[in-house]
Image: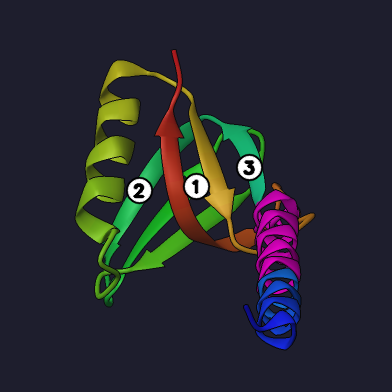
Amino acid sequence: MNIQKLTTNKKNTKNILAKLAYVLAAGMALTLAPLPAAAVTECNLSPRNMYVGDGLLWVVFQGGGQGKIAQTSPDFKPIYALFLTAISTQKDVVVRYTPDNADCNALQEIRGVWIAR
């Protein structure tokens, strides 16, 4: 039996196991790392009236604030439907704006809408 071969095989096995442990530890660290949060602002608002034209949906809210979204946006039709529903049923909406810490009482670009009870 060749002692040198046995010693070399043990060293190779240790190296492979050490590399595998390193890769697994790195993978776990990446999996458990927190993901960056999307910077958005959500405002609880009551839509007062809407204007559709000039390529935009423009919404004015009771108590101040306005939102707009382009008709070319892929979310235009669902957002328009939610605002129409909210106005006709007198429900509040939660409007999501893209910038973090956006002023709910200013004109903002609408990113999404929740309808509230």
Task: Please determine whether, in this image, residue 88 is positioned above or below residue 101.
Answer: above
Distance (Cα) linking label 2 and label 3: 19 Å
Residue in the image at 32% along x and 56% along y? 51
Report the front residue among 62 and 29.
29
Which secondary structure is most common in the magenta stretch? helix
Give 73 or 92, whichever is nearer the viewer: 73
Q: Which mark is residue 60?
A: 1
Residues in magenta?
16-40
Element class at badge 1? strand
**Mark number, residue 50:** 2
Q: With 49 as the anchor, is 1 left or right in this view?
A: right
Could you classify mark 3 by the number of other residues whose Cα lies within 10 Å: few (under 14), some (14-19), or many (20 or more)?
many
| In the image, residue 35 lies in the stretch drawn in magenta | yes
**Mark 2 residue type:** Met
Give the residue at mark 3: 42
Q: Position of residue 10 (x, y in %)?
A: 72, 72
Report the residue at 20% width, 54% height from top: 77
